[in-house]
Image (cartoon, grey):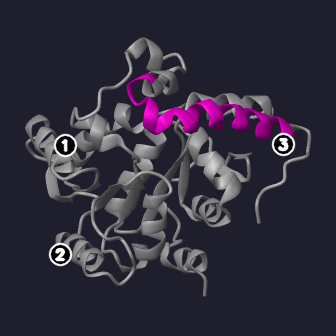
Amino acid sequence: MSKVDALSEALVRQPAPYSLPTETVDLLGVRIHALRLDELLAYMGGVIAARRRAVISYANIHALNVAYRLPWFRAFLNDSDIVFCDGFGVKWGARLLGAHLPERFTHTDWLARLADLASRDGFSIFLLGARPGVAAEVARRWQQLYPALRIAGSHHGYFDKAPGSAENQAVVDAINAARPNLLIVGFGMPTQERWLLENWDRLDANVALTAGAVFDYLAGAVPRAPAWMTDHGLEWLGRLVIEPRRLWRRYLVGNPLFLWRVLQQRRGRLRLAE
């Protein structure tokens, strides 16, 4: 059995306590849910309240470019319970295909609302990712803002993630000892997806949410682009200015490639890697 098949079996496919809109948009072979943030939060809360399990993933231009060339990654996204729109580029790409995604929401903007929801409803959260001390700083800040919030634990992302390694097993054991309702995984893409693919069936958590570099921003370790940029589809440019060495290829090469691939899909000429 492949890892992708194993993930499909590991996801509990019982009917969700909250019915999501059935409309989805196919963009570069990835099924993206046409939903709003309030609907996503309600769905996550319902899954946790019912003690079910779900994997929540996101789609931005980088994600769709990775999915275009990596079949296992594309399959992971399509096997996830939810894939939400995390980027204006994805909204615009859908529009080029004559489809509509009602809302774009990026983790830095909405995780505070999720933490507030968790504090009010009694859900516990485990933060996993970033450099040593960063996730712990996010947990400290959230605890100050939401005293009732149950932080089940935190751990950095700098450990040996190879299946069967002692360090990886120690992290799995720590999560399972905490039994969080929500596990937020921020290793960056596609490392976080590969790690969940290899470990989700062994984790005692209700919801896994992939989150990229969000802990760096929430902890203040990396500055965010000004609001006028993030609100008008230019967050990618702000990130490029802040971290040019790390992100130049993703944006200066990846963004034009994405547009070309969407146009190929519009013409019926898209050919995905197999």
Residue at 78% in and 29% down: 96
Judge the density around disc 2: few (<14), some (14-19), many (≥20) Cα neighbours within 10 Å: few
Q: Which mark is residue 35?
A: none
Q: What residue appears at the point 62 percent right and 52 percent down from the top-left corner?
A: 66
- Residue 162 lies in magenta, yes or no? no
Other-residue count near label 3 (Cα within 10 Å), few / some / many at <14 / 14–19 / ≥20: some
Which SS class for mark 2?
helix
* Image x and y of residue 121, in percent: 23, 50
As displayed, is residue 20 above or below residue 109? below
- Sequence order check, earlier mark of 1 and 3: 1
Which residue lies under the disc numbered 1? Answer: 138
Residue 95 in the image: state x and y as whole percent: 74, 29
Quarter assignment of residue 165:
bottom left
Residue at the disc numbered 3? 265
User: Dot 2 corresponds to which residue?
Assistant: 177
The mark lying in front, picked from 2 and 3, is: 3
Between 268 and 70, which is closer to the camera in this rendering? 70
Q: Which residues are magenta?
A: 241-265
Mark 1 crowd level (few <14, some 14–19, many ≥20, 10 Å Cα): many
Tell which of 37 and 274 is nearer to you: 274
